Amino acid sequence: MVKVLRRKVVSEIRTSYLQYLSVILIAMLAVTLFTGIYANYKNFDDRLNHIYEITNMSDLTITYQGYDAKDEEFLKSLDVEYERRIYITGKTGTTNINIIVFDENTKMCLPTELSKENYTTHDILVDKNFLSKKGIKIGDTIDVEIAQNEVNATITGTMIHPEALDNSTYSTGLVYIGIDALLDLVYQMYGFKVTKEIVYSLYANQYVIQTKNPSKILDKINEYYNQKENNNLLYAAERKNMPSNIAIESDVIQAKKMLYVFPVIFYLVAVLIILTSISQLINKERMNIGIMKSFGYSKKEIMVHYMSISILLCLIGSIFGIILGPIIIPKVMSTKYNYLYQLPKYHVSFLRVEYLISVLILILVSIFTSFIACRSEINKKPIESLRGENSVNIKTNFLEKTKLFQKIPLTIRIALRNMRRKFSRTLMVILGLLGCSSLLVCGFGIDNTLTYGLDLEKKELIPYDLTIGYISGGSKFDELSNIEGVSRVEEYEKIAITVQKDNIISSSLYLLPEKSEIFTTDYSKDGVLISEKVADEVGVKVGDDLKIIINNKTITKKVSSLVKLCVTQGIFISKDKIDIEFSPNASWIKTTNSNVNSSVKEEVEKLDNIESVFTMQEMSDKADGVTSTIRIMTTTVKVFAILLAIVVLYNLALLNFEERTRDIATLKVLGFNRIEIGMSLTFEILTSTLIGSIIGLFFGYPLLVTVLSINENPLLTYIYHISPLTYLYTILLTCGVSIGMNSIFSVLTKRIKMVESLKSVD
């Protein structure tokens, strides 16, 4: 008997392949999305861990001010591996750089992918992107500012360093200097030679630590410094919270969190489609179920038979999903990671336990939905099943008794009756389209958010026409003001800093003129104005005290207000409200007319000591380059949403067509043509589509916030915004897909023979 049922499974799938195709497709989409997003997270995490492993990256970093031998004695008592090193900030032109000094004993935080086989303590290495950013090559000499002293450094090679993986044009460059090369630079600064010991006593300010229990050791370190009488600690952090690594570590966490958004929606819709498909199967198999019970098949055998069908369909879809997911989505998302970070290439893996877990979840879902769909029919007596499907007695409601309702065309009234008769299926379609609609609003909303934030900043918050960077400090106000077409010049100084409250991050301090007409947000209050992104990352709010570390000196300022900026991030303060010597290294320019921006740029480039000049349009194009990686994700969301809509509507249209065969045949007997019958089918599904889509519009914004909040970009702040046109496009897309699906099935009505109407049991 078991063999007979197995053959029947294959036979039923073959005869109802179109209906079961929707189950295969939704299973494939759900597994593709889950395995793809998980593979993206795992590949990203593996690539990062590989870099950490081959470079022997430290687990903890302590940055201090002023060497104290007691600190080193304390570290020895912890039984950890540690190294003392020099880590200082500097500049080359207006570009901020971090300088790490190594010697012959350095074993932690080593460089990789070197441009030369061996390097020595006489070498000066820079990260690979530094050359392209500065437009220089190996062997060139650059001006470097260290501790307010300018020296000439010759680049001897390139590398990738685990503390400089950020690939963006906005990142701080890293210079890896050997101790002997640093001694030569110190000689340039002071005119006499010093020893290695003296340099370390003057500049050493960090310990890098390796330990198996970083969190536990960090707690002991913080406890030690908190109890210390002369606390010289600037900050102590685990690798994931280090200023140089916090962005990439956060991206790994965000990649994992994506598992809890889109796959959940697709799995929920998969439940609906499997349930509706199996329910339709049971409706068609009533008589066969009665025959099987008459032949002596047990309820368990019949239940297992129909469960095996749904399991087989889910397995087929899952196999395709396991193959496609790890190939498609990581490839798409790697574009973002390759743009932002310097990482090794990823390798596709199809053998992960988590993939099998996702398939098992889908199979359990299919078993559960099959059980729910089969239970009521299997519990009937064989004679009840053998009679087939009886007409359902639907009571006439108040609206159907009105004259207005009686004037509605018969085909539309039949559609309304069928929606009431199959209310559970109609509800499932509404829920499915709700998911599709919310995904589409989310996808289009991401585009809206990016465009809105960029436009808000460049048109309202900082509406400059040109931005200029100087090679060296010193005012260029008079020279710039004398250029024809320039109406206003505002100079400011941008300084690389580290800020600390709950967290420690690298940021920028903007020393602005006492009064600005270009930077429109008020920064004249006591304290500092801080961008919301930096405030969130460091953990401060209005009224909190904030530590600002500049060249190893700490300044404490109160946060007076916050500003929401999309691209420009940092801390803003009037130059007269902070005890720092003002030496402008950049400026914003307003022109008399945007048409003269290009000619003004040409004149500015002719001046001495000008490092960079960008028009507002060029800065906008650069920002678009950054956001292009996020737009890739947006396109992925929209494509999967449309695919989901197609599968849901295809499933509904097919079920509706097969269930209403007798209705269609009856309408043909009564003389209705194919177009009128098609309108009845389209009206029913289009109504469900509209209801589901409209409800889904309200879920689009929360989904948008959820997606972007777990996919934060270190270069941007998202200012959430959804355009009214987005809602219109969503409705048009879902309804367009609905009409398209029904048009296909409307054509198939000509294949239905009118004799079908005589087969029902009334």
Image (tube, rainbow, N blue to C red):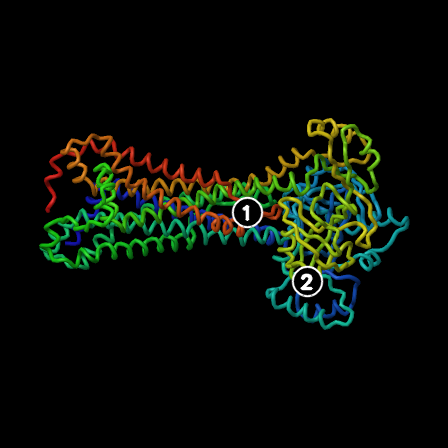
Residue 739: x %, y % from top left: 33, 35
Q: Are marks 2 and 1 in contact (CB under 8 Å)?
A: no
Q: Nearer the viewer, mark 2 or mark 1?
A: 1
Image side of residue 413 versus residue 118, left or right: left
State the separation of the CA atoms marked 2 and 1: 34 Å
Q: Nearer the viewer, residue 126 or 594?
A: 594
Residue 559: x %, y % from top left: 70, 57
Residue at horizontal 25 percent and vertical 57 percent from the top = 371
Residue 346: x %, y % from top left: 52, 45
The answer to which quarter of the image holds residue 335 is top right
Residue 89: x %, y % from top left: 75, 51
For label 1, the residue is 720
Q: Nearer the viewer, residue 625 or 516?
A: 516
Q: Disc 2 on helix, strand or loop?
A: strand
Q: Nearer the viewer, residue 8 or 609?
A: 609
Report crowding for label 2: few under 14, some 14 to 19, many 20 or more residues within 10 A (C-alpha): many
Q: Residue furthest front?
A: 403
Query: Which kind of residue does numbered mark 2 sit on?
Result: Ala
For label 2, the residue is 236
Residue at horizontal 65 percent and vertical 59 percent from the top = 540
Query: Which kind of residue does numbered mark 1 sit on?
Result: Tyr
Decide if residue 258 is in sight here: yes
Q: Residue furthest right?
A: 191
Q: Nearer the viewer, residue 692 or 157?
A: 692
Report crowding for label 1: few under 14, some 14 to 19, many 20 or more residues within 10 A (C-alpha): some
Image side of residue 323 versus residue 749, left or right: right
Decide if residue 435 is in sight here: no
Say which label, 2 or 1, has the lower sequence index.
2
Residue at horizontal 62 percent and vertical 35 percent from the top = 621
Q: Disc 1 on helix, strand or loop?
A: loop
Image mark for residue 732 = none
